[in-house]
Amino acid sequence: MTTSLPIVTPGPPEAPGGALRAGRPPAHLADLDLAARRAAMAALGEPAYRAGQLSAHYFGRFVRDPAAMTDLPRAVRERIAGTLLPTLLTAVGERTCDGGATRKAVWRLHDGSLVESVLMGYPDRVTACVSSQAGCGMACPFCATGQLGLTRNLSTAEIVDQVVHLAGVAAAGIGPGLPRRLSHVVFMGMGEPLANYARVVAAVRRLVAPPPEGLGLSQRHITVSTVGLVPAMRQLAAEDLPVTLALSLHAPDDDLRDELVPVNQRWKVADVLDAAWGYAAATGRRVSIEYAMIRDVNDQPWRADLLGRLLTGRLAHVNLIPLNPTPGSRWDASPKPVEREFVRRLRAAGVTVTVRDTRGREIDGACGQLAAAAREEATWPELEGTQR
Ligand code: SAH
């Protein structure tokens, strides 16, 4: 099988309030940095400082409703909010489990595409898992999103708006003893973030910019996960944006990785690990090596030993993910004793390992289970089912 890779395809910047090009999401405040928002405000004939006021509502208080913007003159509220805060995401469903601590939101985009985001509350942190594309073009056979194919890249604001929505949900309280402040963001929802490079990097900049320009999250609390698009990994290392990089390795040998992560046919295990170590060297940050444990596929002791040899002495951490079942897949998770032996061998090689929880499994919200478009008719009775 050959792969064709849509890597790094930044679109031209769009003027807010400008003509909506067919198929493109409306331009939104979160597409712009603060200087560009001030210019946009001036273009609307308003004082530039209103950019800060509007931004403070959106990023600081998660307010989008003009009626709630009482510090703005009534006459200008509708106009500037209508222009700079168009509706990007319409909620079409929410599922919760863990007593409300885990929530999956399904959003319809302006063109009818569906994407999902997941909010996970823990005693010490609240994490948003966001989508960077509608569908995904990477075709990993064990991932539900990978079976959908790619519909399109999300815009910067479509990515940021998922986080801002979830920050609002967290602020309203998602359960006793859980923090109200969203603290972590992982780009582990639908899509391959580094295949939508420019928009994802811009979204990260909005997330870390201090309020009112952005959400003021810590860079250390943002994780970008990739199948291993080597040129984009190298580009990210040079961005001066030291987020945590997660590399979806899933196999230590090219024979198996060619099958599990088809992009490996283009960039081999040695190449992606070399790019990962380059990232670690440039940022000083430990790379997270993701490894889905698939029974009798990639969980053999010899593969643990080989993985251990590849990672010994490196700035790396292994995150094992028990495979989450996806519809129609012939694979399941490794048995616990096999998983424990895998962990033991990696630790014996001096590698740090954690096993990820399977949060959200029962709401199809766990890793690899996000496939809203495919489930549209099947399990979302609240969808009208007419929009696609
Ligand atoms: N495209 C990016 C980010 C999305 S997925 C990437 O591949 O890294 C986030 C993680 O979930 C990836 O490590 C992915 O390989 C993993 N994953 C996908 N399907 C899974 C499944 N069915 N069970 C467990 N993990 C899965």
Image (tube, helix red, strand yellow):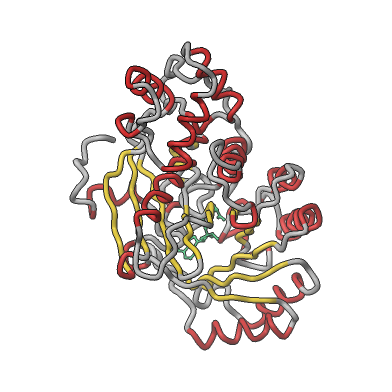
Say which of 165 and 266 sits in front.
Answer: 165
> Could you tell me residue 153's position as x and y percent?
50, 37
Say which of 326 and 31 sits in front.
Answer: 31
Residue located at (27% from left, 49% from top)? 93
Along the horizontal axis of the image, is 117 left or right of 317? Answer: left
Residue located at (75% from left, 71% from top)? 311
Residue located at (68% from left, 80% from top)? 346
> Could you tell me residue 2's position as x and y percent?
60, 46
Along the horizontal axis of the image, is 374 left or right of 380? Answer: right
Task: Give the image quarter of residue 36.
Answer: top right
Can residue 386 be seen? yes
> Could you tell me residue 73's position as x and y percent?
37, 21
Residue 188 vs 25, above or below: the answer is below
Along the horizontal axis of the image, is 42 left or right of 103? Answer: right
> Could you tell me residue 66's position as x and y percent?
33, 29
Residue 154 vs 80, above or below: the answer is below
Residue 327 vs 32, above or below: the answer is below
Residue 313 vs 141, above or below: the answer is below
Residue located at (41% from left, 67% from top)? 178
Task: Give the image quarter of residue 264.
Answer: bottom right
What is the number of callouts on the image? 0
Can residue 330 be seen? no
